[in-house]
Image (cartoon, coloured by chain):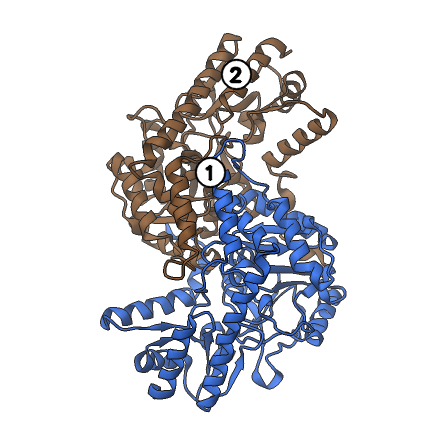
Chain colours: A blue, B brown
Amino acid sequence: MNENILNPHYSELPESYLFSTVARKLADYKASHPGAEVIKLGIGDVTTPLVPAVLEAMHKAVDEMGERSTFRGYGPEQGYGFLREAVARGEYAPRKVEISPEEVFISDGSKCDVANFQELFSADARVAVPDPVYPVYLDSNLMAGRRAVLMPARAENGFQPEVPHEKVDVIYLCSPNNPTGTVLTRETLERFVSYALKNGSIILFDAAYSAYIRDEKLVHSIYEIPGAKHCAVEFRSFSKTAGFTGVRCAVTTVPKELEKLRKMWFRRQSTKFNGACYIVQRAAEAVYSEAGWPQIKAVIDGYMANAAMIREGLAQCGYTVYGGEHAPYIWWKLPAGEKSFDFFDRLLNSCEVVGTPGSGFGACGEGYFRLTAFGETAATKRALERIRDRLK
Amino acid sequence: MNENILNPHYSELPESYLFSTVARKLADYKASHPGAEVIKLGIGDVTTPLVPAVLEAMHKAVDEMGERSTFRGYGPEQGYGFLREAVARGEYAPRKVEISPEEVFISDGSKCDVANFQELFSADARVAVPDPVYPVYLDSNLMAGRRAVLMPARAENGFQPEVPHEKVDVIYLCSPNNPTGTVLTRETLERFVSYALKNGSIILFDAAYSAYIRDEKLVHSIYEIPGAKHCAVEFRSFSKTAGFTGVRCAVTTVPKELEKLRKMWFRRQSTKFNGACYIVQRAAEAVYSEAGWPQIKAVIDGYMANAAMIREGLAQCGYTVYGGEHAPYIWWKLPAGEKSFDFFDRLLNSCEVVGTPGSGFGACGEGYFRLTAFGETAATKRALERIRDRLK
């Protein structure tokens, strides 16, 4: 192979995806400490089984796939109507946001959509990304040869990023934020929408964790902000809402006010994607059913009880923590001067607890550490006891 | 929105994806002919239900997702080991090809992988694509700003494309070919491998239909050709092999001889993809089980009986046909001078049968029409009777 034919931008990436690095470090530790009971509060992965309404819908859909009269081959590239309608009704109507099923696209995951959406922009589009944030926004743009403008979010301004000083074309926002667990305020979002409308920019709004917001007055969808339909695309996910990290289903909303972009996304998806699994789409539909939604809420309540326990446990030890009130992430401020990757090793070696180093989410994440509320409650409790007793 | 920020290459694409156009034409016809019994032999979509071994595996996996002790969240980005091992054993070992599970990547579909793989190459890589062929190769490159060199495949040379006269970096091949139904000969493949090794090029080999090859002596995997591991990536799919068009699972193989490319694909997938659904991966594993494989073979035999019926039916009407012997596609030569999109309308209006216009697969497809063997047998028989009695 002539290596000159390869995409040169891959060599500008960090050597491996953050969570791959963490997984490798953990595997190394386990190999050298056989029998260790490591507690994983690292990757944002759920542990509670799928709820009964979802399981029932999946069994039914599997049965349908076994009968000629109900078998389904390729589905509509944009997703089945039954699910797009359920999303419009279940995600948007309760927030008094009018989104029609034609504006909703179903996929196999928000990570894919969030990473692929940049393809619709020109190679020299200027991109802005919060710091710290989920690494996929930055990495997918790096792979396409775009360097991003960073928007720092620091404790002193409540982890609210500032609108860029320069003119940018595409702005990523994540609320509740991964990793800080902070919800963007209505005022912050109004500032970004106003900026985007003035500059002709597009906001890519990642709402993967909105089901964890406990205060109904906080903004759950970017479309609650006037004017947002003219400048914003929204990503919503079943992964954290309904424990679908291993099931794979998500929603991307492109409003008809952005018709050209909506058509391009349809073209992209119909050319490079073949729809989400039928059984999975039926499972996702059941999330919004009369039986399903209360079951889902109970699971989220359980995770949020974990979040409260982590917040309080760390605070009792004298640590400063953020997040965890409207998000499944706790953002732990480390002792002054300690590097977050060093702390990863210290926590693993002294407590056999795994978290995620803050610097993996951006330079402004240095000095912080992310814990997740997705662990089992008993294990999470044990992790906090170990931190209290053994962390040194 | 400032439209200058958009990817300009989308405007160079045909207005819609081929099969979306065909679907729209069909919907229009149905709207103006309510009650019409249209027989669809157009899109390559399966109609036979999933086999019992697959259904059983899916039910079992759904149950696992309902218990905390067996629940699975995010899977390995490259796919579960159990499936990668089953693929190595089920797809490669029988052909005496040594491929290890580390070289196998599981995804939610070959369309995605085939469309996404071009991202690993530089923007100015020179790409060659057969004509006619599955439109995704060309369209995904057009979206990235690459114009492809076309490799004509015509009846007079047995639909075997010629190696490019100029130097190209990336070569797409599809065997059995969609749409011509032709299998590339060992000699053709040797010529391409030799070309690629000499020029440092990469062959992207799409083997989505290899399970339909009826002659064991024909090449089923590019890795049967000496040297191919140093220059070829292979795409295999469960869509047509096991009726997974609505289930979504596929395999991309990047040999360790192409380690840099293998690492880049891992980086791409771990950054922009989050693994295929666990239930689907268990379903795919069952395809290779002792119970599953004979069930799968029986379904394929059924489709190939349809293919033989279409070949013979059209031949009896005096038409020249190609393909359909080792592939589920019949490539129908139209009366001299007739355009394939005109014939689409003529066939629909006179017989209420839908096929796919050959020109949708490239300029060399003009004057041809693709029928698929994936219809129900009784409906396929009726379609042939209508063609015999009503086509004018």
Residue situated in front as seen by the camera: B178 or B160: B178
Q: Is residue B20 above or below residue A28?
A: above
Amino acid type indicated by mark 2: Lys
Q: Which residue is mark 1?
A: B128
Q: Along the polypeptide, which appears first: circle 2 or circle 1?
A: 1
> Given the image, what chain letter belongs to the residue carrying mark 1?
B
The residue that appears at 71% across and 66% down in the rendered structure is A196
Amino acid type at mark 1: Ala
Q: For the residues marked 2 and 1, what is the alpha-carbon distance in whole angstroms?
A: 38 Å
The reply to whether residue A142 is in sight is: yes
Given residues A258 and A46, the one toward you in this image is A46
Q: Is residue A96 left or right of residue A117?
A: right
**Which residue matches tag 2?**
B381
Circle 2 packing at 10 Å, graded few (<14), some (14-19), many (20+), is some
Q: Position of residue B146 (x, y in %)?
A: 53, 45
A93 over B371 or under it: above or below: below
Q: Is residue A375 left or right of residue A105?
A: left
**Quadrant location of the C terminus of chain A in the rendered image:** bottom left
What residue do we see at 65% from left, 59% from top? Answer: A91
Please provide percent x and percent y for residue A356. Answer: 42, 74
Q: Is residue A114 left or right of residue A16?
A: right
Q: Closest to the observer: A111 or B277?
A: B277
Q: Position of residue B313 (x, y in %)?
A: 50, 12
Could you classify mark 1 by the number of other residues whose Cα lies within 10 Å: few (under 14), some (14-19), or many (20 or more)? many
